[in-house]
Amino acid sequence: MPRNALYAQSGGVTPVINASAGGVIAAARRHPDRIGTMFAAQNGILGALDEVLIDTAQLTETHLTQLRHTPGGAFGSCRHKLKHGAELKRLFELFAAYDIGYFFYNGGGDSADTCLKVAEFAQYHGVDLTAIHIPKTIDNDLPLTDCSPGFGSVAKYVATSVREAGLDTASMAASSTKVFILEVMGRHAGWIAAAAGLASSDAASPPHLILTPEVPFEAGRFVRAMQETIARVGYCVVVAAEGVRDAQGVYLAESGATDAFGHVQLGGVAPVLAGLVKQHLGYKCHWAVADYLQRAARHLASATDLAQAIAVGEHAVSYALGGLRSVMPAIVREDNEPYRWRIEPVPLAEVANREKPLPLEFLNGDGLHLSPLGREYFAPLIQGEVPPPYRDGLPDYPRWQFVTGAKRLPAFDPARG
Amino acid sequence: MPRNALYAQSGGVTPVINASAGGVIAAARRHPDRIGTMFAAQNGILGALDEVLIDTAQLTETHLTQLRHTPGGAFGSCRHKLKHGAELKRLFELFAAYDIGYFFYNGGGDSADTCLKVAEFAQYHGVDLTAIHIPKTIDNDLPLTDCSPGFGSVAKYVATSVREAGLDTASMAASSTKVFILEVMGRHAGWIAAAAGLASSDAASPPHLILTPEVPFEAGRFVRAMQETIARVGYCVVVAAEGVRDAQGVYLAESGATDAFGHVQLGGVAPVLAGLVKQHLGYKCHWAVADYLQRAARHLASATDLAQAIAVGEHAVSYALGGLRSVMPAIVREDNEPYRWRIEPVPLAEVANREKPLPLEFLNGDGLHLSPLGREYFAPLIQGEVPPPYRDGLPDYPRWQFVTGAKRLPAFDPARG
């Protein structure tokens, strides 16, 4: 007898998380004898708790194609760490009501933890459930996988953006703006900022300075490095991770900007750095904050990243059907030239609640530049262009309206316990 | 006897200003009997004053192809308003020393003024010089032309970016970020912000609110409109021009943010708006500042914009050879469906020092949305994709090193008068 499956997206979305969803759905459809209905929870685990489920049978082949080229979360995502007690119990009531035998959770570190909790609860209570975690995070900080789906596309976006903005800065530097600062994501790890270093093709080309959370920020050192760069090439392009902090662990973005009313301004490390440049060097400075632009830029996705996002989705299903439990399909790098990779299962217990920091050897000795070793690691991840279809001059992203099913359970009461 | 020509780029660069340069150079090469050497000034008019000139004969056909797909200013640009007196006199000494009969100046409103000064000086002193202004500005505020080369590509970039980031915001809104704000360029005019409205395909889709300098900002009205949007669609995406100001003309970006040391923070209207949202509505809010990213994003250039940038360059040369003086090739819209345009000469005297504001009828009655009339105007300008070649996963932009010629004149002494 086939059993049903539940798929949910979790945490911040990526340009290619929908491609993983498509991989899961397509793979499940190839096994109707084993997997009956594949449900998707609306807005991640919250939709599971509230029993807002989408029967993915309503997705046509056109929908599956669209999943491969549309950013954001097709079914909605959420930030919610599943609580022991009432929430976990409710989830298993849902599993029972829908005969869910397979749980596919698509997210980063926090969702790996949630997925593991679910697997452990099932095992403890003797419930026949297979829980598989599907990796996804632009932060690239999941352990045991060479890289995380979503990251390669963000790396391609920031490297492209800094290369382009660098040409702009170079054009104007003789008489106007000499400094450009691009703030990228990375609260805890500098993977994205470091990958922007791929834009640099020689010692003179941008980015000239890379600031990561791993290397404690020192204002004096930053200002001197900038002066040296400007003396050498006439201008300076900086990429800064949002999580840049000093030796005491104080985030630069929280270094105290307040508005006229005395309210603390909402973050941004770039304007703080721009203030430093103006104060210490007096140069005209432009800054950009990529924010969601970088993690939604499906128009510039990496073909490698897209292929890996689809593959982890497909492997999740084959692992589940092959009897593996509590695993995550991980990307294994086989070779660099030419780049070859494969998918292998890794134990979820070793993934959950562990962050993989950027190796310091991916930066040069001064910690402000991408090292050859770092370049070797990042370069394959941004290869290949897979643009979405365009219509009327813009990416033709669908605006889906999926139908959710009638409820079978009483409304969830978190207090019930 | 052929005479020589001088080409210079001026002001902020665009994704397609090099395409105009390529148009000028290629067109001049078709008339060796009339135009001898085509020089390009390094760093705009500053290079002309300092006699740092590039003989464009060194540009191969490959270089000309690269000019069509490379952002920034190939020869460097500058922000410098040519002064009467010593500077103008020096320029004409250079013209005499190099037998310059044609001066092509590629820029926005300020450079139209410079170009006009040069033409008037020549006429007054009986110098045989043809001065042609080639339009370029992402601000789209040049008069007498339907649009300005550079603008269409920026419009395509911001509309794409807001559509993508909007999908991200929608995915997370149920449990996390409900508001996303994208700050775009436009200190004096809201052309770019308004064009971002093209991303919206129906009343529910982003951007939901557009803030322009033309519509005085009122915090209460903004907050109410945001609340209404969130009640209706669950989240709110805002596009704000950097030049948003209140009824007293005070820029929001200058509304008084200071850092821990009491220094005024370097601008940014997005963080100020985010602060308002947090203060009045308490929603989690993300914001991005596109800055140079938008005006350097050749990877997302509009085919229409690129074709027009090339055409104005080519027409500048044919006007010069046809005996027209003190004109600018302007883009004339012939029809909307299908979109057809042609190039016509307009008198430079009517272009210089005039800014074309965004027509208020391009916005809806509330001033916060793109109107159907506005959509009709903007839509054709972003049509068509013309991606650059990619190499190793990134746009393959050349890093030119053009040779500058030996000097013939004594060094420029601005004090000489």
Image (cartoon, coloured by chain):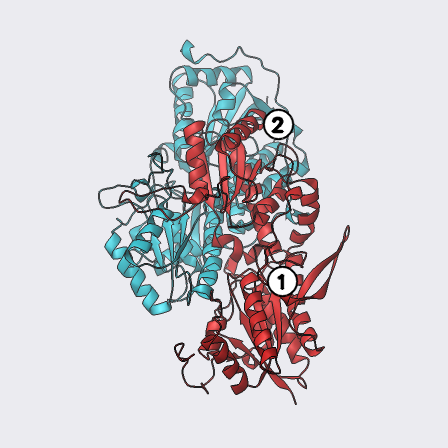
Chain colours: A red, B cyan
Left or right of A157? Residue A248 is left
Q: Quadrant of residue A319?
A: bottom right
Residue B139: mark:
none
Residue B33: mark:
2
Residue A351: mark:
1
> Above or below — where is A29 with respect to A160?
below
For image coordinates 31% across by 60% down, the residue present is: B226
Residue B190 visible, this orientation: no
Left or right of A387? Residue A276 is left
Q: Quadrant of the N terminus of chain A?
A: bottom right
* Residue furthest left in the image: B248
> Above or below — where is A172 with respect to B156?
above
For image coordinates 42% across by 9% down, the residue present is: B416
Labels 2 and 1 in the same subunit = no
Q: Quadrant of the C terminus of chain A?
A: bottom left
Nearer to me, B223 or A228: A228
The subunit carrying tag 1 is A
The subunit carrying tag 2 is B
Percent x, y for residue B348? 39, 33
